[in-house]
Each structure stands twice: as C-alpha cells, then as structure tokens.
Amino acid sequence: MAAAARGPLPAAGPDEADEAVRGTCEDASVCKRFAVSVGYWEDPYIQCFVRQAKERKAPEINRGYYARVHGVSYLLKAFLKKTECNCQIVNLGAGMDTLFWRLKDENLLPRKYFEVDFPMIVARKIHNIKSKPPLSKPIIESHSGDSLLIDSHSLDSSRYSIVGADLRFSSDLEEKLKKHNLDIHLPTLLIAECVLVYMTPQQSANLLKWAASTFPVAMFINYEQVNMTDRFGQIMIENLQRRQCNLAGVEVCRSLEAQRERLLLNGWENAHAIDMMKVYSFLPQADVKRIEELEFLDEKELFEQLMQHYCICWASKDSSNLGLADITF
C-alpha cells in the first residue's frame, strides 16, 4: 500500500469512525442531488434534504450514481411485481434516501416501508420531514388509523416508519422494528447500500443471518465495493482512510464470489453478484444513451474501473414460491 511508505495512517476511535461513516450519508445525498440537477433522473424530493453541491461532480461519478439508483430500483420493482406490493421494505442505513416518496408517486408503495439509520441521521431526517410539506404531506395522505407517532428519533405512520438504531446489534434492531409493526410473515425486501462494508465481517454476517432467519419470504439487495484487493481498490481504501473512514468489512469485498458466498453462508437460498459495469450494460439502452449525451466523459477508462469496483448482490428465500429466485437483470 502506498500509504505504508508515508508511515501508518492514524486509526480512528469508534466514535470518530462512526462520525466518518455518517459523513458518507451527506456525500452520497449531495452527489445524487447534483446528478438530478443535471438531468440523470427525476427526484423532486432530494432537494428537501441536501444543499446543492458547491462544485460540479465528475461525469463518471454522476453515471455511477445513475447506475446505482436504476440498478437497485430494477430489482426492487421486480420484487414489488412478484409480491403485488403485498410486502414490506426495510431500508437499512437509508440516510436521506427518497425512495418512499418516489414509490408513492408511482403508486408502488408496499404495505409498509421502514427506514433504519444512526439516531443522529434519523433526527435530522425527521426534522426535514416535519418542516417541509412536500415530505410530510405524502406521509399524512397515506396514513390511516390511529394518530401518527413522531418524536425526535422515530416516526411511525401506517405506511412509513423511520427508526434510529445501530445495525451492528440485530436484537435491538428487531425490537425497534416490531414496535413499529414489522410483520415477519409478510414478504420482506431488505436494502443495504454501502452499509455492510462499514461493519466487521462478523457483524454483517450476523445481520444477514438475522434477516434470513427472521423472514420466511425475503430478498436482500446489497450495493457496495468489490475487487478491492487490486491497485485501484487499494487507492480507494487509502482515500477513505485519509478521511478517517475505515472499511471494516472490506475483506468480503475481495471478489464477486466472496460477496455471493457471504449471502449463501448466512442462510440465503440463492444469491447473485454482478459488477456495476455489467449492471450499466443491462439498463434500458435508450435511457443510457440519453444520459451519456448530458455530459462529455473524457475518462472512459476511469469510469470502467470505478464501475468494476462496485457491485449489486441480491439473494432470496421463498417458502411461498413467489418466484423470487427468478429475479435477475
């Protein structure tokens, strides 16, 4: 590693490391808002959560986020179709994600949509929801039954719930979700985007095992780094370490096979993993052509390298034979 030549990088303490991970939520949201402002995809809600970026984001970053958003959305919509929306979604480490509002606009809401993140991030999101009618109105409109519960660290309506919890402790997570009417018998989609990589391999294994053993019918979508043992991967790791951001779970990101294996070893019946360059090639090519005309991409090789170092993995278990194993690109 190049960093070794300059002496070891100082290790971050637990609080400092968590703070750095929380910072990645802001980075991702700012990047998404910039890509939306250029026209990569439509999201009228992201502006309610984050400021516009002070400087332009590189075209390869914008295309990468485009592939991430559309890749996850493709699998998610396939799950909603198989279950006819008679399901629940649990978005793990959701940050400032706007998926609930976008699904409502498309008339694709599941029975209930849950979000989980650090209490500090949840408090900020709830503040935004309470103070901005474009966010609060859809929650109120979709709510039925008793009064809507809201405090600084949690919000619970009949269709949307946001919970402050640490994903490294699955028993605490389950208890909080059940308080908000999680139904373990309902087909459940769990989503984690750049989340597991910040947990130790044991912690992420525990989370995956908990999900597989809790829900008889479920699918897990994971988006994160891959092929991290090569030179390009090492540079990515060093760049994050300089920001005190430690990829505690990077060992599992060594290959697509390691990613697949982790899911299979932790109770999932079948699993797939493909890099983002492949995902990009599977997306509707007319829209890909449209976004490629938005900005000139000088660094084609850099874009391909970046995309080969991120992946989407998905796994399912399906005791009701809904055909979840058939979901693919």
Image: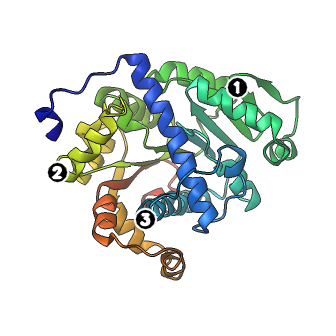
Residue 86 appears in view? no
Q: Nearer the viewer, mark 1 or mark 2?
A: 2
First reached walking from the N terminus: tag 1 or tag 3: 1
Tell me where residue 198 appears, x and y as whole percent: 37, 33
Residue 293 appears in view? yes
Q: Which residue is located at x 57 percent, y 50 percent?
A: 54
Q: Nearer the viewer, residue 145 or 313?
A: 313
Residue 309's quadrant in the figure?
A: bottom left
Q: Which residue is located at x 44 percent, y 29 percent?
A: 20
Amino acid type indicated by mark 1: Ser
Q: Which residue is located at x 66 percent, y 64 percent?
A: 42
Category of crowding for the residue at label 3, using alpha-carbon neighbours closer than 10 angstroms: few (below 14), some (14–19), many (at least 20): few
Q: Which residue is mark 3?
A: 328
First reached walking from the N terminus: tag 3 or tag 2: 2
Residue 179's quadrant in the figure?
A: top right
Q: Are marks 1 and 2 in contact (CB under 8 Å)?
A: no
Category of crowding for the residue at label 1, using alpha-carbon neighbours closer than 10 angstroms: few (below 14), some (14–19), many (at least 20): many
Q: Which residue is located at x 48 percent, y 62 percent?
A: 62
Tell me where residue 15 appears, x and y as whole percent: 43, 17
Q: Which residue is mark 1?
A: 154
Tell me where residue 246 appears, x and y as whole percent: 32, 31
Q: Are marks 3 and 2 in contact (CB under 8 Å)?
A: no
Q: Nearer the viewer, mark 3 or mark 2?
A: 2
Residue 241 lies left or right of residue 150; in this view the side is left
Q: CA distance from mark 1 to mark 3?
A: 34 Å
